[in-house]
Each structure stands twice: as C-alpha cells, then as structure tokens.
Image (tube, rainbow, N blue to C red):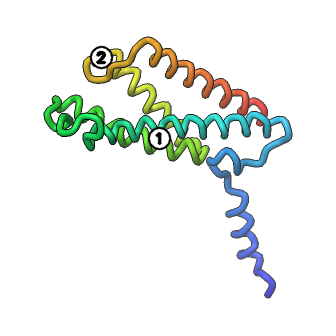
Amino acid sequence: MPRSSSQKGTLDLARDQASDRIEERPAAKAALRWSFILTWYMRVLSILWIMKGLSAWAVILGVWTPGQFESRPMLYQATIIYFALIDLIAAVGLWMASTWGGIMWLLAVMSHLVLAAFFPSVVSSGFLTITFFLSLIVFYLGIAWLEALDR
C-alpha cells in the first residue's frame, strides 16, 4: 500500500532527527576514528564508575563494616548515598555513549573533587586519586574535542 505524502514526511523527519548517542551519528571516515575512541573510552570509564558506585552501595549495606553506616554522621551518610546514586547513573550514561552520560560523569567527578577539597574528613582522597581523576577529565575532554573537530 503506497504511503501518503504526509506519512512519508513524518517518517523522514523521525529518521533525520539527531541522536545524542555518539555511535548513531553519521560520521565521515576521519571522524569515525575519534568517535570510536571516545565511545570505548566512555565504556572503560563506565566500568570504573560501576565499581565506584557499587562500592558506595557496599558501604551502605555494610558489606565491609556491618552496622557502621547508621552510626556515622549525617553528612557522611548523605555523601555516600549521593555517590551511590550519581556514580551508577553516570555509568549507565557513559556505557550508552550519550551526551548526558558524559555530563553526569563530569558532575560526579567534580563533586568528588570539590568534596575532597572542602570536606576531607567526609571524602578522603589522596594525591594519587585526585591526579587520576583530573587526568581522566583531561583525556575525556581532549578526545571529545578531537572528535568534535573531525565532525
């Protein structure tokens, strides 16, 4: 059965809408390389952030120290719950290689760095952890910038 012109226009419009997923964007040959690298970098970050989020849940559920979470100060509890949620949300977005995943991940990392700077008793991060997080941010922004230049 032939389509009417209005149905055909609607289908073409739906197909032409831009997706925020990196691997669904039409790309030139050169852009394919940086897009591929960015997608896999985001997936590796996703695995790291799944582990980070699950470790926060392990603290909440008392896997390592049973019964200790409830006796901690409220600021500590709120921080752990925040990271238990935001880290896993960011990990899902990173795995999907979506724009919002990168933004949520940057929010999670920057939250960690700011809390480590201003509340070291709540979020203890050593020099190596802070350097590691900052280098992850620099690599992410660099690869994203190169991918955008090739597009």
Residue holding disc 2: 120
Quadrant where the image shows the N terminus: bottom right
Residue type at tag 1: Ile
In this view, the residue farthest toward the top is 127
- Look at discs 2 and 1 and give the one toward the viewer: 1
Q: Earlier in the sequence, mark 2 or mark 1?
A: 1
Query: Measuring 51% from the left and 35% from the top, which residue is drawn there?
Result: 48
* 66 versus 11 height, above or below: above
- Spatial CA distance of label 2 from label 1 is 23 Å
* 32 versus 144 height, above or below: below
* 122 versus 70 height, above or below: above
Residue holding disc 1: 50
Label 2 CA crowd tier, 10 Å (few <14, some 14–19, many 20+):
few
In this view, the residue farthest toward the bottom is 1
The spot of residue 37 in percent (x, y) is 71, 35
| Circle 2/circle 1 CB separation < 8 Å | no
Res 62 quadrant in image = top left
* 123 versus 65 height, above or below: above
In this view, the residue farthest toward the right is 29
Residue type at tag 2: Pro
Q: Secondary structure at mark 2?
A: loop
Q: Nearer the viewer, residue 141 or 94?
A: 94
Res 11 quadrant in image = bottom right
Q: Secondary structure at mark 1?
A: helix
Label 1 CA crowd tier, 10 Å (few <14, some 14–19, many 20+):
many
Query: Measuring 51% from the left and 46% from the top, which residue is drawn there?
Result: 92
Query: Measuring 66% from the left and 31% from the top, which residue is drawn there?
Result: 144
The spot of residue 41 in percent (x, y) is 64, 34
